[in-house]
Amino acid sequence: MPRRRQNIRRQRDGWRNRSYPTGMLHSPPTVYLDTQDYSRFGTVIEGRGSAETEGLYKQLVALADAGDATFACSMPIMSELLSYNDNLPGISDAKAQAVEALCQGHALKHPSRVVAIEMARVAYDQELVSVAPEERPHSNDYAWYPDIEDVFANLHDRIRAMKDEHINRASRLNRAARRMAQKQMRSFDPMTIVNEAAPEVAARFGFSEADAHASLGEFLQGRISSREGSRRMFATIARPTTFVQAYFLANDGDKSLPAWISGFGEQIAGALAKFQNMFAALPPLDDASRSSIKSLIARQASGFSTTFLNLAKDELPKLTMPTDLFEKMSRDTALVNKVPSASNAGKLLSSYIAQTVGLVGSASKVERSFGGDLMHAVYLPHVDLWRADRRFAHLAKLAVPGFKNKVVTRCTELPGAIEHLLRADKERHQ
């Protein structure tokens, strides 16, 4: 028997023998791949991948094509995956093609939206609101991007400010001049504001000016809602290969990701580095001191969980939740800990800090990818199988053991893991 087939059989046997939750969240199971997986599959599309990687990629695509697994991308995946490499100009497009071949439109929504959906669900379960949230974290049309309804609301603010300015100016004029100013206001064309705003919006988010102009114009004319306008604009670049074209291949200048899709990881890495430097300056700690500090860090987890909820602060009202709900929930530690992504983030951060300062084993370096890893972990409660690199997968299993059976450490284990879930689900329904 060929070695690769033997390896796959061993991987499947390993999944047969491990414990697993009694039910899947979704049928077929939803799989969240690590960014590095898509990068490896991109090399297959470019013709540079190994035979083993190519075989695995074809297996997973076959599972997706057959409807036996749903692979979902996300904003963190898009932001990390499509970083431009001048030495390999075609790899971004190849990786995007791999995302499309596997995900086939499926995505998990923007992290801030997912946290808001979780909060709304907790609020309903705790009888803080009477209506359950209808929105779900999953999308089948690449809705991984943020909601930019505020951009549309800003149009009305601009028009209102312009009118107020004209009124204030007219109040200081004589009667004839006031009549002239009033006549100018009556003939004012709101599309003037659209003409001014469209280039700004296009430059900020990567849309074409024509698409930005069309959506903004439709909104001001009352034909679409602000949310539909946001969806329409991002839909023009949401498909992974289109996203590459919009940001990299069609741009001869800056090849970096725009601010709306990057930056969080760097902020987290900077904060962790300061924490590590503070501990490095301390004298050697005895066991009692180490235990005390470790307990202190663990207690701080709930504080970071509360801070993590800020991702959802502007999103909750868009889910028609009461305006005071965010403040009410964020002040209640018990409620904060019921929000899965926020609770997990606190536990992951405290465990990571303990590692980086040497309270658990020897001190390890702070990885700039940790902030991105926390964003990927937002989706852990919402998928059936979740991939991460070896270090973060190990951290997740230790820090949030309730989810450890979802964590897949090696990508080569996925076919066996998916098969195990499908078989177990079939047996439950017989």
Image (spheres, rainbow, N blue to C red):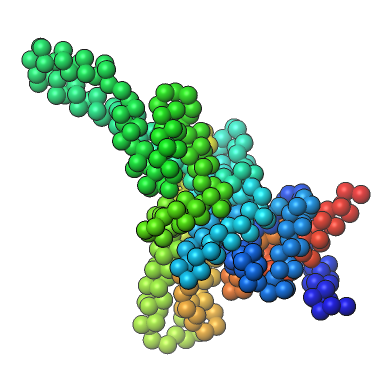
In this view of the protein, which residue sits in the foreground, 287 or 369? 369
Task: Please tell me which residue is depicted at 22% across the width and 25% down the height of the picture.
Answer: 164
Residue 413: image quadrant is bottom right
Dividing the picture into quadrants, the one containing residue 34 is: bottom right
Looking at the image, is 324 positioned above or below residue 114? Answer: above
Tell me if residue 339 can be seen.
Answer: no
Image quadrant assignment for residue 86? bottom left
Residue 118, relative to residue 381: is it above or below?
A: above
Front-lying residue, 139 or 64: 64
Image quarter hosting the N terminus: bottom right
| Residue 362 image point, x, y percent | 52, 84
Answer left or right for 254 relative to 409.
left
- Residue 314, image x, y percentages: 44, 42
* Total numbered circles: 0
Residue 99 location (% of width, % of height): 62, 56
Nearer to us in this view, 245 or 40: 245
As drawn, is 1 to the left or to the right of 26?
right
* Relative horizontal placement of residue 331, taking residue 14 as reference (left or right): left
Most extreme residue toward the right is: 430
Q: Position of residue 415 (x, y in %)?
A: 77, 64
Q: Name the residue: 63% across, 59% down.
A: 98
Does residue 366 show up?
yes
The residue lying at 39 percent from left, 57 percent from top is 252
Image vertical order of residue 208 relative to residue 91, above or below: above
* Residue pictured at 49% horizontal, 46% vertical: 146
